Amino acid sequence: MGDGEPLMLVQMVSRGSPLDEASEEEGRTGWSASPQAKLERLMREVKVPAGLLCNGDALRLVYAPSGESSGHLTFPVSAMCEVSGRPILAALHMLLSEHRVFSAPDGRRLLDILSESRKYQAEVSNRLSDQVLGALWELLRGFQSSDPEDGRRVFDQTAREEPEHVYGGLLTLLMRLIFVLYAEDEGLMPEGHVYANNYSISGLYDRLRSDAGRYPDTMDQRYGAYA
């Protein structure tokens, strides 16, 4: 930004005040909105895309560029006071140091980093949307091929009469599969052979791949719904 123009807005609220909840007292006397919402409104009005919001317990970096959705990153003070919280403190310093905000080379300052991050976020979102759409088609083809005669007839009829119902059902199933796969990958699901052999999605996929290798001529119907 040019000389004399603000780089960031800073707002302090009462210690311990929730950043995402409206104050009951303010609701009786004025605009009932959270400190986060108020800061975002002010940032958009004065066209300053970055802001800091602090309540003594947390420091929040807010990014609200004009015409775009907002985002924020919160740094809890208590965590940064612990040895285990050093990476959080280091990240805070990396983003908000004097060098990063004022004197870093063009393209490496805080506002530049926030802008590039938003562009990358949009790119990732577009890629994910394409992947989700492709997965939905694969899931639909899998259900149809699992029962070529009755399955295709039922799906075709339902798709003509209630396309939103089919889309919503497939999307819900896909999101649940992704959730369970993530939980399994992170070790959040029950351990032991009972879950692995009877409920695990990744285990089912491994068994289907094994069956496909041993019985390639008979796997079309068994494998279709899990493509």
Image (spheres, helix red, strand yellow):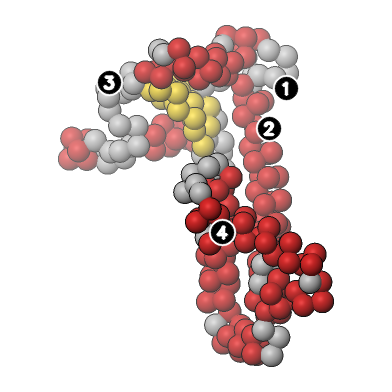
Image marks 4 and 2: residues in contact by CB distance under 8 Å: no
Residue type at mark 4: give it: Asn
Q: CA distance from mark 1 to mark 4?
A: 52 Å
Check if mark 1's residue and mark 4's residue have beta carbons within 8 Å: no
In the image, 57 versus 36, the foreground residue is 57
Q: CA distance from mark 4 to mark 3?
A: 52 Å
Taking the spot 50% from the left edge, 20% from the top edge, the residue there is: 88
Label whose residue precedes the other's in the sequence (3 or 1): 3
Dot 1 or dot 2: first in sequence order is 1
Where is residue 56, by image quadrant?
A: top left
Q: Label 2, on which residue?
A: 116
Q: CA distance from mark 4 to mark 2?
A: 45 Å
Looking at the rendered structure, the secondary structure element under dot 2 is: helix
Tell me which numbered mark, 3 or 2, is placed earlier along the sequence: 3
Which residue is under mark 3?
Answer: 15
Q: Residue at x 59, y 15 (%)?
A: 94
Could you tell me the amino acid type at mark 3?
A: Arg
User: Which residue has dot 4 on it?
Assistant: 197
Give the CA separation, mark 3 to mark 2: 33 Å
Residue 158 lies, in percent from the top left, at: 58, 85
